[in-house]
Each structure stands twice: as structure tokens, then as C-alpha cells.
Amino acid sequence: MTDQAPAPYAGKPRVLSGVQPSGDLHLGNYLGALVKFVRLQHEIETFIFVADLHAITAWQDPVKLKGQVREIAAAYLATGLDPKVATIFAQSAVPAHAELAWVFNCVARLGWLDRMTQFKDKAGKHKERESVGLYTYPVLQAADILVYKATHVPVGEDQRQHLELTRDIAAKFNHDFDAPGFFPLPDALTQGPGARIMSLRDGSVKMSKSDPSDNSRINLTDDADTIAQKVRKARTDSDVLPEKLADLEGRPEAQNLVGVYAALSGREAQDVLSEFAGQGFGAFKPKLADLAVAVMGPIGGEMRRLLSDPAEIDRILAAGGERAREVAAPTLAEVKRIVGYWAG
């Protein structure tokens, strides 16, 4: 890499993010990502996709995959993304993602990918059995971002390394092909409070759709009774809630439920403690259950309504895909010219 400061990018600000269609979305996804997307769409041009190209880095049932794509799209819509404001689309509907990824495969260096810790975590001791796609998918992520010249990307801590890779790829492309400022070096938008929601059964691990216990999470499609029941069954301890946030240290389940209440109510965790200090979970859980039902119940109902009409979801995805292709096409055409591809 060059030591010279990169030329500034002069294009318009744009945000991009996506979610893999690999199973039910839950409260952690909602608070960690979806509510952020809804806010961002009114602040900056927003592109939100369903990452079905990324999904097949692990085996997906082809019969179910299309339905899973619709489910993620339904979640986007039910939580407040407006297809008239944000561009909502399926990744596979825009071939430019894969085309640009090949160019970036030839720009990125093997040593950069060797440092990606997510591949090491997912592959474990058997990396030779994993797909090449799982190894190179951070390069596809770079293409996802840069084909739209996105300047901002909402990321959690587990994706920061991949965003740094995207910045490295953009800088190296701009330098190697003497195209200063062609691609932006996208900045991270941190998730903020509520981003890390833990299991309702074990406060030391993240809420996850892969947990075998359905009671460990609140799914976006859960009805009101199910949501309330899961909150009431959530693991806690026998102590009362303290006055100060620091006194929750060493109480992961209590810390998690206070954090969930704060995130759902749009308040700070300390404010929640100030309200409930000295009370036990027998008093706190019913209030949390009522709040969770009030916020999450309508989302589940709207998702079920949307999923009952797949043609409407498909129409929205098709329109979003057309818009995404229109934006991606000039970038890819210019990349081909810069690289020196034969144009015919």
C-alpha cells in the first residue's frame, strides 16, 4: 500500500447493509440492526439487501431459500423500512456484485484474507473442508459496498475487520489503477446501545437463531402470548435490581434484561435502574413483557400479513432490484474501462 494520503471521495453519501436469509430473525437482529436501518433511511440514501449470495457459503436448502429471502424482506418492511424511501432488494438480483467481486479478488492479497478471524472461527480445525466462498466472502462484501459507492456501513464488532478489508481493497484499486478517489473508503456506523442482545436462557452468549432452545430468543414472528411467556421464563437471579449500572457487573442475565428494556423503550439502562431499583424480577418481568409485546407484537402481526401475500413482497424486491441495478451499472462499467476489459 502507498504511504500517500488517499484522494478524497467526492460522491454523495450513501449507506448500505444486508442480512443473510439463513433463518428466523429475532429481537437481537431487530435492536442491533433493523431499527438502525429504519432511522438511517430518513437521514441518508439507503440500500438494504437480502444477502442470498452470502447465504450459500453454508449449505442452504434450495427449496427453502427463496422463502427465507421473502421472510427477511418482510422483516425489513414490518419494522418500518419504506420501499419508497430505501432501496430494498435481493443481492442475487444484481449480477454486478459478483462481477465486481472477481475484480476485487484480483486486487486483494492472500495475506489480507488469511488474517480474517471470522473464517478461522467458522472453519475451526477443518478449514480444508470449507468452501472457497466462505474464505473469500469478505471480498464479496467489499463488492456489495463499493458497487454502490457506499460511504457508510452499519457494523457490529464482528464485521469491523471486514470493513477494514473493504477500505484496503478500495484504496489499493484506486492506487493501482491510477484512479484517485474513484471508490470511497467507507466509514463504520456503530450499532450503539442495544446492539448486543444476549440469550434469554444464558446471559453470557448472544441471542442466536442457532440456539436449539426457542425460549432463548424472541422471534420477530412470535405472537403476543409467546413473547410474554418467553420473557416470564427468561433466566434471572434472586437479587433485586440495584441503583447503579456498575452493580450489575457479574449478573449477566439481569444486565441483559435491563438492556433489553432500555433498548425497547429508547432509554438509557441507568434510567431503567433508577425506576426499578430495589425491585425484584417478579415486578420487573411483567413490565418488560408488556413492553416487549407492545413493541414486538405488531411487527410479528405485520410480518405474518406480508408473508401471506408473497406476490407483494416479490413486487417490492423486483422494484428494488431494478433500482439497485441502475445504480450499480455505471460503477461496474467504469471499473471495466479502468481495468481495461474488452468492451466490444
Image (cartoon, rainbow, N blue to C red):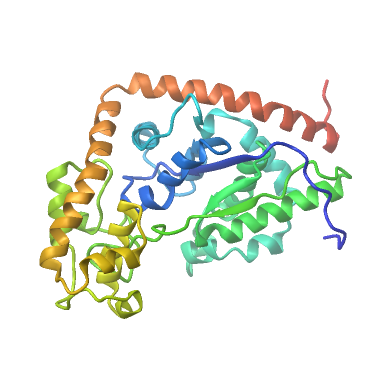
Residue at image point 44% right, 49% down = 58
Q: Is residue 122 above or below residue 131?
A: below
Residue 35: % across, % down: 41, 45
Residue in the foreground of this view, choosing between 329 and 47? 47
Q: Is residue 201 left or right of residue 332?
A: left
Residue in the foreground of this view, choosing between 304 and 302? 302
Q: Is residue 34 left or right of residue 154?
A: left
Q: Is residue 181 left or right of residue 231?
A: right
Residue 307: % across, % down: 29, 28
Residue at image point 27% right, 77% down = 251
Q: Is residue 46 above or below residue 324?
A: below
Residue 144: % across, % down: 61, 41
Image quadrant for the C terminus?
top right
Residue in the foreground of this view, choosing between 202 and 262? 262
Image quadrant for the N terminus?
bottom right
Q: Is residue 93 above or below residue 51?
A: above
Residue at image point 22% right, 41% down = 297
Residue 224: % across, % down: 16, 43
Residue in the foreground of this view, choosing between 78 and 115? 78
Residue at image point 23% right, 34% down = 301
